[in-house]
């Protein structure tokens, strides 16, 4: 996938690109509004990550310009401003998603995959990984064509891990993904453990290979 | 405590009455002395007439009685009284009653014999005159005083009107609710100055306050990007294939610290937003449904502590920001779970008037006077102490009341709509 990262903070931009490239994506970068305008004019992308506060302009203007040109590129706004109004404005201008800093790279990656999936596969939204088939729209999981039933949270976790194949996802990121902003409950890390344990058991029982690997208590990796 | 113009009026009234009494007394005295002098002159004239009369006649002079004048002759053996004047009360035979009068008494030789002559003149006519003069002068003065007092009363009431208005506006001035201090129009220089000074101060306070809030907002926003960098760095480090156990532990701690920092920042930003009333998306929120959603959302935590939930809810809709309603319930229900004990219980009661959430806990009662303060937390709490502050701000923004109480080992928070 071809992704444009528009972000003026150098380190963050570099980390995002490194993470996404390791997943096999092609990344382009822009650190100013002018640079971003130039790149979007020349090339099209599967997904554009758009920081709203750029040194020389407002990201929302760029978004409006893209939509005026009827571009089909997916756009995810990444911003430090958690403003309801801006969020609504961004989404109504045609952004596909809105991610507030700070975020986990695994979360960003999952959102990008979701946006690209929605844009590429019209209607049917099925992620296949070996014997696993996940219908994200219908919220159904099949192992070797056989339905298995997962709770809502288990399903969300599975989609999240599959979107970050071969990456270690920290428990912190997993908790945030499931419980959102309110992930500060004392024992939330234990629940991630419980959920993943249950998820693993259900998958293995259905004949799926155990793709989950624990990483020193920090997190988990979903890999071959 | 006395009102300014009551104090002023009281002093004015006291001084006026005392002054009036003194002036009245002096005036009356002078007037009567002046009148006495007039009567005395008249008496002397009468005496001269008596002498004239006696020179021509040699017979015994008879008592003379006129309407206002009585002349008495008493035979005496020897003259010894010199002429003198005085006040007296005498029987007026013409009128048939006693009245006050002025007399002149002198021993005289009339027709070769010695007589004591006493001439008494009635004071009545003069007293009437004196009274009229007195009244003509005093009554208008009294009237003037009453008019002055009334005018004074009316004026002070009117003159102080802008002051009262300034006071009322000052009382209704509230930094948090964004309203401006309402300027009062007045033509009185002192009040104008006071007004201008207050306008000036209120604007300065407002701008300072705004700046502080803006500072908090900007500081929190500016912190988000570095935190995002830290977070992304941690995520990258995590991908390293040869993490030692030591490094993993460090990563866990760093993740937890970063997420705390993020949460702190988000809470501060949220408080600023509530303060500034920036969350204006009002809609009808079905509280009953939202509570049920929250209980489902927290179900793992509830199950883990084996908490018994007693839910007694009626349909209740509130017109408020959905986002804030969400956070309000997250905080209240989250707290009730977080601070609960194993096998504890939570009672949730929702009706048209209030939402009451009470829970068992091993923690002691909170101090109700500071429980909702920013950064206050009970010793056992692991939070940052902003959750209840957010609850309170949210409640205040929507004109609800939030009350904490601790009874029968139950911590309860009651939100009164």
Image (cartoon, rainbow, N blue to C red):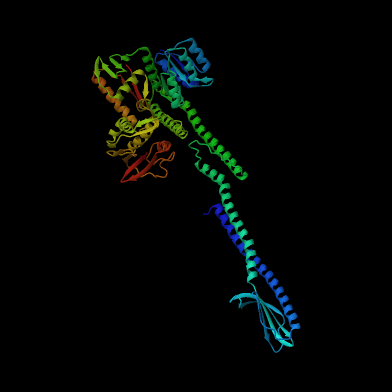
Determine the image quadrant of residue A84. Answer: top left
A148 vs A85, nearest the viewer: A85
Q: Is residue B133 left or right of residue A135?
A: right
Above or below B307: residue A153? above
Tell me if residue B303 comes above or below residue B407 in the rendering. above
Viewer-closest of A151 and B199: B199
For this orientation, the residue located farthest to the bottom is: B77
Quadrant of image for the C terminus of chain B: top left
Camera sees residue B232: no
Residue B41 pos. (x, y %): 72, 73
Residue A157 appears left or right of B225: left
**Which residue is at 54% across, 36% downward?**
B208
Choose between A133 and A15: the one closer to the eye: A133
Vertically, is B99 above or below B186?
A: below
User: Is residue A118 something one can see in this rendering?
Assistant: yes
- x and y percentages locating residue A157 in the rendered image: 32, 23
Question: Residue A89 placed where, x, y %?
Answer: 45, 22
The image quadrant of residue A174 is top left
Front-most of residues B241 and A193: A193
Q: Residue furthest top?
A: A42
Which x, y percent locates residue B298?
32, 31
Count the numbered circles shown.
0
Q: Please indicate whether residue A42 sits to the left or right of residue A104 in the image.
A: right
């Amino acid at each position: 996938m071809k992704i444009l990262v528009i972000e003026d903070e150098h380190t963050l931009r570099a980390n995002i690109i490194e993470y996404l490239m390791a997943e096999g994506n092609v990344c382009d970068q822009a650190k100013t509004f002018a640079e971003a305008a130039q790149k979007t004019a020349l090339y099209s992308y599967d997904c554009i990550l758009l920081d709203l506060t750029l040194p020389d302009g407002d990201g929302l203007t760029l978004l409006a310009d893209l939509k005026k040109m009827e571009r089909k590129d997916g756009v995810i706004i990444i911003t430090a401003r958690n403003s309801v109004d801006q969020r609504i404005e961004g989404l109504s201008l045609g952004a596909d998603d809105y991610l507030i800093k700070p975020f986990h790279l695994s979360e960003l990656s999952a959102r990008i995959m979701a946006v690209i999936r929605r844009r590429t596969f019209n209607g049917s939204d099925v992620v296949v990984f070996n014997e696993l088939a996940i219908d994200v729209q219908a919220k159904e999981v099949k192992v070797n064509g056989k339905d298995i039933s997962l709770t809502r949270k288990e399903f969300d976790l599975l989609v999240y891990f599959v979107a970050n194949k071969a990456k270690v996802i920290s428990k912190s990121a997993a908790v945030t993904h499931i419980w959102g902003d309110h992930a500060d409950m004392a024992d939330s890390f234990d629940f991630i453990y419980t959920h993943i344990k249950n998820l693993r058991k259900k998958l293995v029982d259905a004949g799926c290979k155990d793709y989950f690997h624990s990483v020193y208590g920090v997190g988990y990796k979903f890999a071959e | 405590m006395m009102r300014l113009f009551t104090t002023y009026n009281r002093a004015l009234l006291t001084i006026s009455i005392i002054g009036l009494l003194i002036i009245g007394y002096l005036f009356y005295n002078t007037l009567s002395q002046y009148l006495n002098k007039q009567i005395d002159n008249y008496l002397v004239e009468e005496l001269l007439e008596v002498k004239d009369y006696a020179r021509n006649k040699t017979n015994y002079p008879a008592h003379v009685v006129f309407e206002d004048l009585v002349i008495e002759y008493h035979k005496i053996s020897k003259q010894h009284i010199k002429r003198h004047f005085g006040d007296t009360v005498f029987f007026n035979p013409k009128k048939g009653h006693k009245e006050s009068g002025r007399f002149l008494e002198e021993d005289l030789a009339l027709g070769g014999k010695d007589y004591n002559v006493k001439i008494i003149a009635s004071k009545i006519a003069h007293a009437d005159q004196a009274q009229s003069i007195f009244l003509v002068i005093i009554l208008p003065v009294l009237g003037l005083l009453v008019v002055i007092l009334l005018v004074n009363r009316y004026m002070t009431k009117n003159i102080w009107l802008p002051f009262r208005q300034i006071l009322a506006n000052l009382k209704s001035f509230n930094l948090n609710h964004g309203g401006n201090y309402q300027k009062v129009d007045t033509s009185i220089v002192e009040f104008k100055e006071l007004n201008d000074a207050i306008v000036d101060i209120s604007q300065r306070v407002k701008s300072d306050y705004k700046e502080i809030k803006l500072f908090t907002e900007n500081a929190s926003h500016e912190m988000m990007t570095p935190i995002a960098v830290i977070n992304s760095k941690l995520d990258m480090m995590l991908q390293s294939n040869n993490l030692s156990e030591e490094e993993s532990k460090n990563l866990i701690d760093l993740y937890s610290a970063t997420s705390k920092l993020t949460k702190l920042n988000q809470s501060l930003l949220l408080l600023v937003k509530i303060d500034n009333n920036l969350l204006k998306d009002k809609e009808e929120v079905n509280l009953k449904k939202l509570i049920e959603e929250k209980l489902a959302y927290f179900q793992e935590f509830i199950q883990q502590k084996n908490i018994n939930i007693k839910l007694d809810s009626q349909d209740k809709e509130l017109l408020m920001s959905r986002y804030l309603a969400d956070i309000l319930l997250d905080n209240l229900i989250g707290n009730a779970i977080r601070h609960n004990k194993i096998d504890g219980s939570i009672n949730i009661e929702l009706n048209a008037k209030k939402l009451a959430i009470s829970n068992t806990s091993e923690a002691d009662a909170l101090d109700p006077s500071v429980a909702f303060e920013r950064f206050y937390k009970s010793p056992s709490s692991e939070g940052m102490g902003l959750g209840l502050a957010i609850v309170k701000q949210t409640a205040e923004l929507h004109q609800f009341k939030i009350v904490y109480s601790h009874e029968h080992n139950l911590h309860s928070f009651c939100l009164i709509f």
